[in-house]
Amino acid sequence: MKSLSLMAASLALLGLSGAAQATTVVNQAITEAEVRNAQAAWCKALVDISTTGATQGQAAAKALAEKVIDAAYGYQMGAVLFKPTLTVAPQTFRTTRAGALAYFVGGDSNFPKDTGFALKGWTKCESKNAAVFIAGDSASSMGNVMITDRAGKVTTVDKTWKYVKDDAGQLRIVLHHSSLPYSGT
């Protein structure tokens, strides 16, 4: 009986009682389905931004792109390693939210060469992975994204994405590398 009293006293000192405590279990593991869903959401967002730009103008597309970036990318967690397809030095890499936004919708004098990649009239987007590598709380994927313009022309882009989960358990892009396939010439 003395040992039970000693245990109760020890638990009390630790701020615990002998009663069962509610616990929170946070599972930050990522599934392949989550990766595929994130890629599909990214593709849908690209088409939605493009459609919004065509029907409601650049300001509306910018407002939507801000929401998309805030929901999909991990800029609120720190620098995102984003290398867009059509960027050149000295602004090749877009480690800030402002840089990503300028790339997607243009209109930022700090990024004068950006005309808005997401405003190019995209009507369809599909992701096809070569492979997905999952290591617990991070996932990387590599493959192609095929985007179709209003004229039906398909552009294939090589994509590498890395994802982690934020504190709320939402998948966030923390690395996004995009390039045109090597043509051999």
Image (cartoon, rainbow, N blue to C red):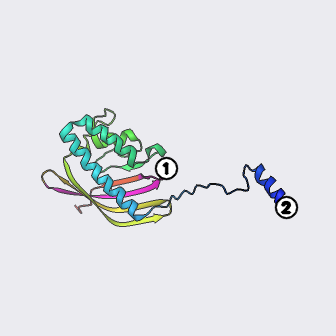
Q: Earlier in the sequence, mark 2 or mark 1?
A: 2
Q: What main secondary structure does the magenta stretch of the protein show? A: strand
**Horizontal arrangement in the rendering, residue 156 relative to residue 26 (left or right):** left
The residue range painted magenta reads 152-174
The N terminus: image quadrant: bottom right
Helix, strand or loop for disc 1: loop
Q: Amino acid at mark 2?
A: Ser
- Between residue 171 and residue 19, name the one nearer to us: 19
For the question of whether residue 90 can be seen, the reply is: no
Q: Amino acid at mark 1?
A: Ala
Per the rendering, the mark at residue 3 is 2
Percent position (x, y) of residue 120? 20, 46
Point 41% across, 53% down: residue? 175
Real-space Cα distance between discs 2 and 1? 41 Å
Point 26% across, 34% down: residue? 59
Graded by Cα atoms within 10 Å as few (under 14), some (14 to 19) or many (20 or more), the crowding at tag 1 reads: few
Point 58% across, 55% down: residue? 24
Per the rendering, the mark at residue 83 is none
Point 36% across, 44% down: residue? 69
